[in-house]
Amino acid sequence: MEEQKKPTEKIVDAAGDLFDAYRNLLTVRIVEQTSLGASVSILGIVTMTVVVFILLFAGVGTAWWVGEALNNMKAGFFIVGGFYSLVLIIILLTARNFILPNIRNLLIKKMYDQD
């Protein structure tokens, strides 16, 4: 009888080891995906901050230039503001059909990237 317990115990031990290995693998993958998400988020925030400042100064400079060209500073700022409004409207109209699916596909590819 002692010999019959040993193979069973080996199978139970092997199953326990397999479970532990799977749990460890799952933990490593969760940490990897979390760190990837955090790093991409931080990079995105930094990039967006820089882009906002670039657009702010480019917009103010362009508005100032157009205002001087028209001899009316208010008109220059309203023209540039209207241009930015037009760009925003175009982005909002194309977001659902073009921008959001591309961003979603990019995120899914990054999540399942198995390098």
Image (cartoon, rainbow, N blue to C red):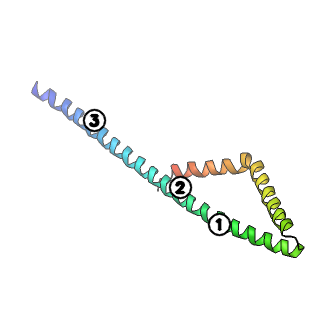
Q: Position of residue 24 (x, y in %)?
A: 33, 45
Q: Position of residue 25 (x, y in %)?
A: 36, 46
* 11 shown above or below 74: above
Residue at the right extreme, as displayed = 70
Near-viewer residue (36 or 10): 36
Query: Please, what is the three-letter code of the amino acid marked with disc 2?
Result: Ser
Tell me the tag on residue 31: none
Q: CA distance from mark 1 to mark 2?
A: 18 Å
Near-viewer residue (47 or 49): 49
Crowding near the residue tagged with mark 2, few <14, some 14–19, many ≥20 C-alpha atoms within 10 Å: few
Tell me the tag on residue 41: 2
Q: CA distance from mark 1 to mark 3?
A: 57 Å
Circle 1 or circle 3, nearest the eye = 1
Query: Please, what is the three-letter code of the amino acid marked with disc 3?
Result: Ala
Q: Position of residue 11 (x, y in %)?
A: 23, 33
Residue at 78% x, 60% y is 84
**Mark 1: secondary structure:** helix
Q: Which residue is identified by label 3?
A: 15
Q: Mark 1 or mark 2: name the one nearer the start of the chain.
A: 2
Near-viewer residue (86 or 72): 72
**Mark 3: secondary structure:** helix
Tell me the tag on residue 53: 1
